């Protein structure tokens, strides 16, 4: 139920500043609000289990290690800290070959919990955080809950007909620079990007880094899709660029990496001064992250290389991406071919939703994409997400011409959804 300002016990102003009084997009398009046989390509969760080599080994650990059931150190369990260090150290080329130290890592209650702790630890009321649109909607409330203010700079979508590439969504560096004020404290950079699928190039990140260094701000690098980069593209970590390690917190996700989004294991990587501040905040928010799942993610990272897990998973995601895009090719709707992540952004401008189609009050007064997504959920029985939710009011028109679909589903389900989506041809 949406929050109200006239409650008997009034809620804090930050709740309304963070827009928690509005039904969020996930609640509107929850399975409870769509036909029971609708196929959910809305939320980014997988419909398969984590690898059995993780779950079987994990069961053994829980049987043999009593302490895996109890509190962990607030920074994280030693086994997982070691696993993160060993796996990710080679990717942080700025370290000069050394391994990440434990004090340069914080295990968090999901990637979102780590980002919330980073904002809590570093943002004063009245300070500003720059977000690049479209942005993950959790950023908005997390920033406002600190008494801080989000400032938005949009990626500009490509123009013209036909299939586009994620790289064609561009950040105007002059607009980015102009968004800074004396109150700017932090910038959130998401690459690979949700929902665009853009993988920022080294040149783009160097331009961003130059401004961040000049303005002396914290960078929160949301890189939870770092293991999903397609077609030979390269994921560059902004923390590895000159002058950036000391000001960057890199955010990672066990749930995205190993198809276990409900385990809620994330982490922050950065200099000890930054991660220690986040630790102080995180331990006052949740104290520690759940111990059993830390052990499971540690097993995954320890064995991923020898099992070629991420290489095989990448091929599987590319297959799933190509299945879903093939149906939109048949329909004749253009889309942005994702370079990374597991989302497909489809241009729905050509689709004519019946003008008199009834939509609930929760979708009224919002972007046109809300009406489209409600309509296809009810009539075609495929759930997508309206990306205008990921824009500020001034930029809604950028997002409302698209719909987001997740392809982190098994091929059979994607084919079933695709066959239903072919009916869109009747409405073009």
Image (cartoon, helix red, strand yellow):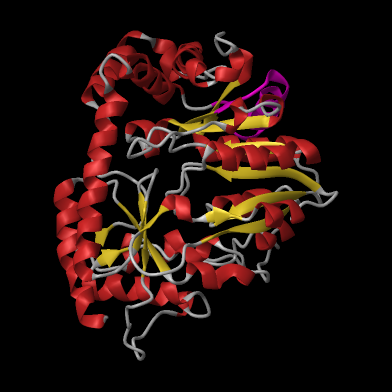
Instruction: From this view, report whether residue 129 is shown above or below residue 23.
Output: above
330 lies left or right of 344: left
Q: Residue at x 64, y 57 (%)?
A: 153
For the image, the number of numbered tags is 0
Instruction: From this view, report whether residue 361 is shown above or below residue 410.
Output: below
Q: Nearer the viewer, residue 344 or 206?
A: 206
Where's residue 142, x and y in %? 63, 48
Secondary structure mostly seen in magenta is helix
Q: Nearer the viewer, residue 73 or 398?
A: 398
Q: Residue at x 71, y 38 (%)?
A: 210
208 lies left or right of 375: right
Q: Residue furthest bottom?
A: 356
327 lies left or right of 70: left
Q: Quadrant of the image for the C terminus? A: bottom left
Instruction: From this view, report whether residue 201 is shown above or below residue 102.
Output: below
Q: Nearer the viewer, residue 350 or 69?
A: 350
414 lies left or right of 141: left
Where's residue 193, x and y in %? 48, 47
Q: Residue at x 20, y 52 (%)?
A: 323
Residue 292 figure quarter: top left
Residue 285 within the magenta-colored segment of the rendering = yes
Instruction: From this view, report whether residue 148 is shown above or below residue 23.
Output: above
Whether residue 75 is visible here, answered yes or no, is no
Q: Nearer the viewer, residue 169 or 368?
A: 169
Whether residue 25 is visible here, answered yes or no, is yes
Where's residue 373, x and y in %? 36, 70
Q: Residue at x 35, y 35 (%)?
A: 232
Where's residue 137, x and y in %? 54, 55
- The segment highlighted magenta reads 268-288
Residue 270 within the magenta-colored segment of the rendering = yes
């Amino acid at each position: 139920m949406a929050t109200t300002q006239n409650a008997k016990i009034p809620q804090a102003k930050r709740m309304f500043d963070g827009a928690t009084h509005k039904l969020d997009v996930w609640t509107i398009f929850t399975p409870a609000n769509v036909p029971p046989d609708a196929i959910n390509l809305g939320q980014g969760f997988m419909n398969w289990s984590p690898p059995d080599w993780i779950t079987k080994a994990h069961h053994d650990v829980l049987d043999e290690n009593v302490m895996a059931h109890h509190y962990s150190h607030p920074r994280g369990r030693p086994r997982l800290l070691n696993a993160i260090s060993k796996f990710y150290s080679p990717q942080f080329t700025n370290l000069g070959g050394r391994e990440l130290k434990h004090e340069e890592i914080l295990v968090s209650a999901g990637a979102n919990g780590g980002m919330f702790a980073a904002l809590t630890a570093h943002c004063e009321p009245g300070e500003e955080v720059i977000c690049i649109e479209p942005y993950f909607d959790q950023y908005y409330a997390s920033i406002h809950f600190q008494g801080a203010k989000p400032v938005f700079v949009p990626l500009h979508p490509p123009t013209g007909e036909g299939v586009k590439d994620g790289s064609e969504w561009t950040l105007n560096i002059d607009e980015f620079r102009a968004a800074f004020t004396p109150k700017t404290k932090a910038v959130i950079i998401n690459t690979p990007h949700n929902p665009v699928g853009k993988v920022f190039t080294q040149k783009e990140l160097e331009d961003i880094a130059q401004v961040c260094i000049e303005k002396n701000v914290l960078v929160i690098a949301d890189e939870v899709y770092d293991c999903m980069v397609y077609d030979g593209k390269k994921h560059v970590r902004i923390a590895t660029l000159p002058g950036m390690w000391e000001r960057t917190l890199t955010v990672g996700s066990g749930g995205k990496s190993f198809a276990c989004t409900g385990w809620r294991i994330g982490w922050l990587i950065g200099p000890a001064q930054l991660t220690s501040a986040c630790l102080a905040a995180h331990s006052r928010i949740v104290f520690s992250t759940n111990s059993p799942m830390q052990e499971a993610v540690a097993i995954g990272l320890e064995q991923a290389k020898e099992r070629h897990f991420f290489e095989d998973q990448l091929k599987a995601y590319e297959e799933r991406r190509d299945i879903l895009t093939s149906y939109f090719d048949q329909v004749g709707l253009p889309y942005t071919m994702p370079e990374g992540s597991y989302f497909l952004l489809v241009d729905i401008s050509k689709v004519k939703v019946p003008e008199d189609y009834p939509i609930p009050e929760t979708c009224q007064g919002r972007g046109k994409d809300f009406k489209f997504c409600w309509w296809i959920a009810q009539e075609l029985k495929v759930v997508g997400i309206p990306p205008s939710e990921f824009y500020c009011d001034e930029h809604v028109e950028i997002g409302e011409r698209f719909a987001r679909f997740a392809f982190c589903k098994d091929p059979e389900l994607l084919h079933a959804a695709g066959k239903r989506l072919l009916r869109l041809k009747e409405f073009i």
